């Protein structure tokens, strides 16, 4: 079976695993926006995105390192054991500072506990997802995501409608429960796949070696995740500051629904592709890697053009009716820019995987910092009198700049693989 055929098989599994949660998300965004109102929904979205930023900071380096180093591991049960051990240690060291930080921002002890619990459980689940990718149990991801999404929506609605609990408490409690059940399911499935193996004489040295590898390769990627979340969060923060919470809430709902709908199709590409690339790279199959990356990029570019055309002709009206947003020309154009920016960003992630194979994590961080500075410069120069369209345009320009910078050295890498 060729590399592309294997990719297509796992892609379909991951696509199915995302379709149902995406449909639930598409239903929940306008529902929660209606229940909470634009301002409260926008406040939750900012805090939730901040939590994801914390997750990326704390354990993003572990998730990326797992996928990169797992194919070369000689004792995979030991690799799994040491990864879990490193994860627990990391979460124990960072839980208290995270809680203190949230409390300093909101002066709410209950909220700080709930957000910290959600952050830790989400981090743990993300790492188990990377382990599940590495052992190629893509079918199990269908059940994992179904458990997570159905539980989140059910618990959130029950809390919001029948308990009278403050809305942020309800939503972050729901996140903790849903990601916790998903993590428990994935842990059992991964552990079943990895049968017991021989352990080295010096278990402490094996753990130290894995930790050093993960830190050297993964820490720049953890900082990269911070910049990546800031890239997708900066426009909302500036809109809320310079325009109004009402506009930010409407824009947030648009961005969430558009980006997550596109992610429905695009994110399975990365989930299916990168574990296959790492295995192929360890085997020296560079030509197959080059062909797969080029094929994926051409397909994503074609899909971007079709999506933009469909949105402009008929999709914008449906979107505004669904999320109860005024059908203003400014909002319609903002949606088009969001579509273009999201696709360009996803294409950049595909190109980036070629650099990750060669351990260029620090170089990737440097390029993304440049892209983020370009975005912030656009917003800063626009100031308080900026039109709404400046913000999705800044996101688009920054994403395109990052893709372009990746492609320039990437041409040399493609030549080396032929």
Image (cartoon, rainbow, N blue to C red):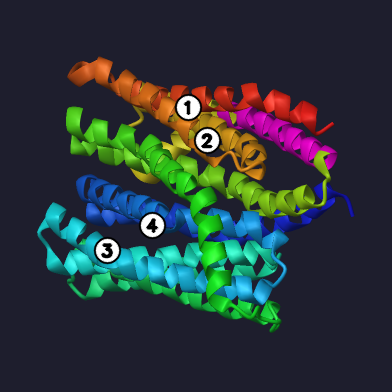
Mark 4 and mark 3: span between their CA atoms? 14 Å
Task: Indicate whether residue 276 is drawn in magenta.
Answer: no
Q: CA distance from mark 1 to mark 3?
A: 33 Å
Query: Where the C terminus falls, by quadrant?
Result: top right
**Nearer to us: label 1 or label 3:** 3
Gap between marks 1 and 2 measured at Cα? 27 Å
Q: Residue at x 26, y 57 (%)?
A: 35
Percent of width and height locating residue 228:
43, 40
The residue beneath circle 1 is: 336
* Magenta stretch, residue numbers: 287-309
Q: Nearer the viewer, mark 1 or mark 2?
A: 2
Closer to the camera: disc 4 or disc 3? 4
Return the mark for residue 212: none
* Residue 117 visible (yes or no): yes
Residue depicted at x 56% and y 63%: 210
Name the mark on residue 58. 4
Q: Secondary structure at mark 2?
A: helix
User: First in sequence: mark 4 or mark 3?
Assistant: 4
């Amino acid at each position: 079976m060729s590399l592309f055929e294997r990719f297509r098989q796992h892609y379909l599994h991951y696509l199915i695993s995302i379709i149902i949660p995406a449909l639930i998300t598409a239903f929940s965004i306008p529902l929660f926006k209606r229940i909470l109102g634009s301002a409260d929904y926008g406040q939750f979205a900012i805090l939730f995105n901040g939590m994801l930023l914390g997750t990326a900071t704390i354990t993003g380096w572990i998730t990326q390192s797992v996928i990169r180093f797992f194919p070369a591991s000689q004792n995979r049960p030991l690799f799994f054991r040491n990864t879990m051990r490193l994860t627990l240690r990391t979460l124990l060291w960072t839980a208290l500072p995270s809680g203190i930080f949230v409390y300093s921002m909101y002066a709410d002890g209950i909220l700080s506990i709930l957000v910290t619990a959600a952050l830790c459980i989400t981090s743990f689940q993300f790492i188990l997802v990377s382990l599940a990718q590495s052992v190629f149990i893509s079918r199990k991801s269908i059940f994992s995501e179904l458990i997570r999404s159905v539980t989140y929506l059910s618990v959130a609605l029950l809390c919001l409608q029948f308990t009278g609990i403050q809305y942020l408490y309800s939503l972050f409690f729901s996140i903790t429960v849903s990601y916790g059940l998903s993590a428990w399911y994935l842990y059992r499935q991964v552990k079943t796949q990895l049968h017991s193996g021989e352990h080295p004489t010096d278990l402490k040295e094996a753990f130290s070696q894995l930790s050093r590898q993960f830190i050297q390769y993964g820490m720049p990627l953890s900082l990269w995740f911070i910049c990546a979340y800031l890239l997708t969060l900066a426009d909302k923060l500036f809109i809320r500051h310079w325009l109004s919470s009402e506009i930010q809430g409407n824009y947030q709902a648009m961005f969430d629904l558009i980006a997550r709908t596109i992610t429905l199709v695009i994110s399975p590409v990365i989930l299916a592709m990168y574990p296959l690339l790492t295995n192929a790279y360890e085997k020296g199959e560079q030509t197959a890697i080059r062909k797969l990356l080029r094929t994926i990029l051409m397909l994503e570019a074609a899909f971007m053009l079709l999506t933009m055309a469909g949105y402009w002709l008929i999709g914008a009206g449906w979107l505004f009716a669904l999320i109860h947003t005024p059908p203003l020309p400014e909002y319609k154009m903002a949606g088009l820019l969001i579509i273009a920016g999201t696709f360009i960003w996803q294409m950049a992630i595909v190109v980036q995987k070629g650099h990750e194979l060669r351990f260029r994590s620090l170089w990737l961080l440097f390029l993304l910092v440049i892209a983020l500075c370009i975005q912030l410069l656009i917003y800063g120069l626009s100031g308080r009198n900026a039109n709404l369209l400046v913000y999705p345009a800044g996101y688009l320009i920054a994403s395109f700049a990052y893709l372009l910078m990746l492609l320039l050295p990437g041409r040399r890498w493609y030549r080396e693989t032929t």
